[in-house]
Image (tube, rainbow, N blue to C red):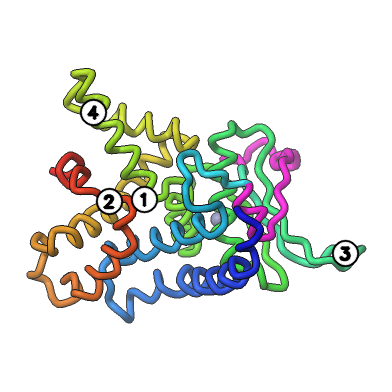
Amino acid sequence: MPTIDMDWRIKDLEDLMRDIKRFLKEEFQGEIQKPQPLIKYYWEASRKADCLIRTVLGENGRFPVDIELLAKRLGAKIEIEDLNEFSGWNNMNRIIGQIQIGNNFFTKEKKKTIYADKAAPTSSKRYAIAHEVAHYIMHYDDRDFYEDYCIMPMCPADIEEIVADIFAIFLLIPVRYFFVEFLEYVKYKREEGKIPVTTENWIRYLADISMIPDYYVAYGYQQLRYVAYWIYQAWNDGENVWRSSGKQNVMTDEDREQVRSETEDFYTEEMGELLFE
Ligand SMILES: [Zn+2]
């Protein structure tokens, strides 16, 4: 990141973090009062993650996203520790991530630390950090916040957990990287004569290059497909948008303009032809 741009970037980053905080804390629950299709929610989450990554890590990134550096540049400290040292013998599940926000008892200094479990594989550590980054954005200016993140398959007890998982996926698999990589993958497979492309191989490949566990990619794949669909509609005049169930599913001219202007630097006609059925 060029130092000359730092000042406006820092100002921008503060606004951006506040905007993402409001979005993560309010919009998912807000759906009940203010109907918004899930597809548009995912699109919004993906473009905010994309904007954050480009502001903090620079414009020309590829997989894997440096999630530790991202967390550090947002002001969090990263520590790798044994997070299961004191858990009992009958604990059902392992803690792989943790976040602690609050004043240090002795120094009174504000502590903002994200922990990842020492024993967890690198890919799980990366996922845990991304999940905690979503909590961090929601709570960085709170007085206190604390949470443990346990490895799947445990079910979420709180809506914030669902929101944090949605955002974590878009941080680790930004939609623009996804499209670029998917096109290269499909073209390569076609040249090798290894078609049709299978879901298992593609998911495993995506997990490898994004450096997160396969099952998290599988979990997040649906939201990536929703966003891909929304982008495709924007470039194809929304001809396939489902119009039968009320106004909120229609892609407006404003939606189309927004999606096109934010994806025109990576979305190509070739992607439209090769990646969609
Ligand atoms: Zn959590």
Classify mark 2: helix, strand or loop.
loop
Q: Residue at x 66, y 40 (%)?
A: 117
Classify mark 4: helix, strand or loop.
loop
In this rendering, the label closer to the viewer, 1 or 2: 2
Instruction: Specify few, some or many for label 3: CA neighbours under 10 Å numbering under 14, 14-19, or 20 or more.
Output: few
In this rendering, the label closer to the viewer, 4 or 3: 4
Q: Earlier in the sequence, mark 4 or mark 3?
A: 3
**Is residue 70 within the magenta segment?**
yes
**Is residue 208 within the magenta segment?**
no
Q: Which mark is residue 175?
A: 1
Question: For the residue marked with disc 1, what is the amino acid?
Answer: Val
Question: For the residue marked with disc 2, what is the amino acid?
Answer: Tyr
Using the numbered discs, state the Cα–Cα distance from disc 1 to disc 3 in whole angstroms. 41 Å
Q: Are marks 4 and 1 in contact (CB under 8 Å)?
A: no
> x, y (%) of residue 140?
65, 67
Classify mark 3: helix, strand or loop.
loop
Using the numbered discs, state the Cα–Cα distance from disc 4 to disc 3 in whole angstroms. 54 Å
Q: Which residue is mark 3?
A: 105
Tell whether 241 sits left or right of 50: left
Q: Earlier in the sequence, mark 3 or mark 2?
A: 3
Q: Which residues are magenta?
A: 69-94
Q: Which residue is mark 2?
A: 267
Question: For the residue marked with disc 4, what is the amino acid?
Answer: Thr
